[in-house]
Amino acid sequence: MISSLDIQSVTQVNERRLMQHGGLPVVDSLVHARCEVFVCLCVSALCTEECSHGRCVSPDTCQCEPGWGGLDCSSGCESDHWGPHCSNRCQCQNGAKCNPITGACVCTDGYQGWRCEEPCELGYYGKACQLPCQCLNGATCHHETGECICASGYTGAFCGERCPFGSHGLQCEQRCPCQNRGTCHHITGDCSCPTGWMGSVCAQPCPLGKYGVNCSRDCSCRNGGLCDHVTGQCQCAAGFSGRRCQDECPVGTYGPQCGQRCDCKNGAKCYHINGACLCDTGFKGPHCQERFCPPGLYGLICDKYCPCDAANTVSCHPLSGECSCSPGWTGLYCNESCPSGSYGDSCRSTCDCAHGTECHSVTGSCICPAGLMGEDCSAVCPAGLYGPSCLTSCSCRNGGSCSPVDGSCACREGWRGADCSVPCPSGSWGPGCNQSCLCANGAACDPSNGTCTCPPGWNGPHCDQPCPDGTYGLECRESCRCGHADGCDPGSGLCRCHAGWTGIHCDSVCPQGFWGPNCSVNCYCLNGGSCSAEDGSCVCAAGYRGTYCRRVCPSDRYGEGCLEACVCTNGTCSPVDGSCQCFPGWTGADCSLACAAGYWGPDCLSLCNCHNGARCNAYDGECRCSPGWMGLYLDTQCPLLALCENCTEDSNNGHRPGV
């Protein structure tokens, strides 16, 4: 341990020396230094220039603080350097600035990281990447501004809306290619074809034999019938009829849709396809209208009378006289009707109908009562059909069911009318529309169950609760985003801007020339005046006054608000800037100086044109004669014995000798 005596033995030195203690080096001091308790204390160095932001460490040498540089430490570091003497280069990227003292980077909006080298993480943007993106439906936002970049199939400021009908893809710029009322997917553009159409753009009808959604159903038309590619309804070939074209045309008809009537006479049958007549023996002609014998006669020489009942007889054979009964009649003379359960020619066929149903006496086809169908009337009408043979389509709409017997409709809740096509009147719902809606504020109620569908701006089971302040839209789900406004419309969300503000969010000041709520009122300030964006009051330009700046300042005033006093002594002043316009004969800034000799007119700009010592009037330049002279410019000497004083003014404003 060093004693106090050891400390006292240390002395100030002027040269570099080695001090010993116990034979060992103790202090290696510096020249001009003092060693106290073995600690060297430097004598203050001297610098010619003061170290502004640092300290003098040796003669004329400054040690600068971080963030400062230069010989005297008076220069702040440039933007890309930092630290003592600005010796360190900043490492910041993307426009970031660094702290000149510590070198820490201060990132611009949209960037992060110790060098600001990384953009904001997905879903954030702005200063320090603290603001969450507001974008919907998988959209991303710009890491600097937060602007939404919509995913394919969406649009809107926040990408909350699907592409409008007829468009798809990125920014909804691609047109849908779907034809025949097909709809396309708002993202991919793939077409969803309506019933009866197929193909990538719904341009191809279903192939033969197919119909319906995606052409997935098989047609059931027979005998060469074609089915509608949308509904599957059969279009029968000539000579056939029925839902599936399964029946030949009824006797007596032929052709497309069995719409033509046979024109065959004398009981002849016609071909069901083209209507050609098939004549019985004893008849001839294209329509079998010609008998070999005259009507009512038969025999080889047509000398015998036919014994047949004419009303029920097709004909009597022109040779044998045998009676050909009309279908449904029998007997030797065709005077007996077919007994029950039989039909056809001579009633030889037996009916084969279920449920004891009668058959047609001519064709034997079962005459099904309303509500039954099938060849033997054993099947109930399928859904959607009713009446005899179930050939009539039900007219019930909107999910109503019809009676297979008479087709009367049983409507679902919310509908009424003979065909269930009439919706419940506004304010009613339920079966028979006999329940009253309880919806308020113009809300519609579901005609089937009475639930209320609130219009924008209302909420609650009965739509009687307005949207809370700051919300709007359907079910009050949207938030108002208004700046200088008195809230927003609860229905549309439109901001109710304060007077003097406009824009979707009421964040824009009224443009020049407009004022009031939403800047909807035109300013009427004249002569360059501007109006207040809040109340429309005019701020007149210099030189004008009045409510609409119509009036010029009084003759003795000028400037903004006509508050400045004119100083023109012999002239008028400009109402705008107060500059003087002097009367003839005067000049000077305030028109207080009379024209100098030899000049006249406004501002004394005109030179007098008088001769022989005459002076001109400073107001109008008129020459005043000297004795002995006359004329407009006094350039004519008076006649002998006449003096200028006796001259009188002539018609040319000159002078002539007095008379």
Image: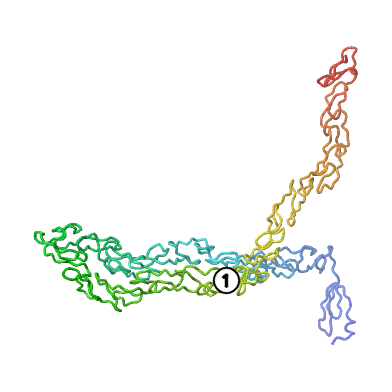
- Determine the image quadrant of residue 599: top right
Q: Where is residue 204 in the image (x, y as percent from the top left)?
A: 38, 63
Q: Using the image, determine if residue 553 lies above or below residue 128.
A: above
**Does the image show residue 427?**
yes
Drawn side of residue 301 relative to residue 330, left or right:
left
Where, quadrant-wise, is the N terminus in this rendering? bottom right
Drawn side of residue 313 relative to residue 570, left or right:
left
Q: Using the image, determine if residue 521 lies above or below residue 624.
A: below
320 or 235, which lies in front? 320
364 or 614, which lies in front? 364
Q: Using the image, determine if residue 658 lies above or below residue 249.
A: above
Residue that extends furthest to the left in the rendered view of this protein: 300
**Does the image show residue 120?**
no
Q: What element carries label 1?
A: strand
- Determine the image quadrant of residue 294: bottom left
Q: Name the residue under label 1.
A: 453
Circle 1: residue type: Thr
504 or 56, which lies in front? 504
Q: Where is residue 592 in the image (x, y as percent from the top left)?
A: 88, 37
Instruction: Count neighbours of disc 1 (C-alpha within 10 A) and say few if under 14, some if 14 to 19, many if 20 or more.
Output: many
Q: Position of residue 572 (x, y in %)?
A: 83, 38
- Determine the image quadrant of residue 486: bottom right
Drawn side of residue 629 relative to residue 342, left or right:
right
Residue that extends furthest to the top in the rendered view of this protein: 640
Q: Where is residue 218 in the image (x, y as percent from the top left)?
A: 34, 70
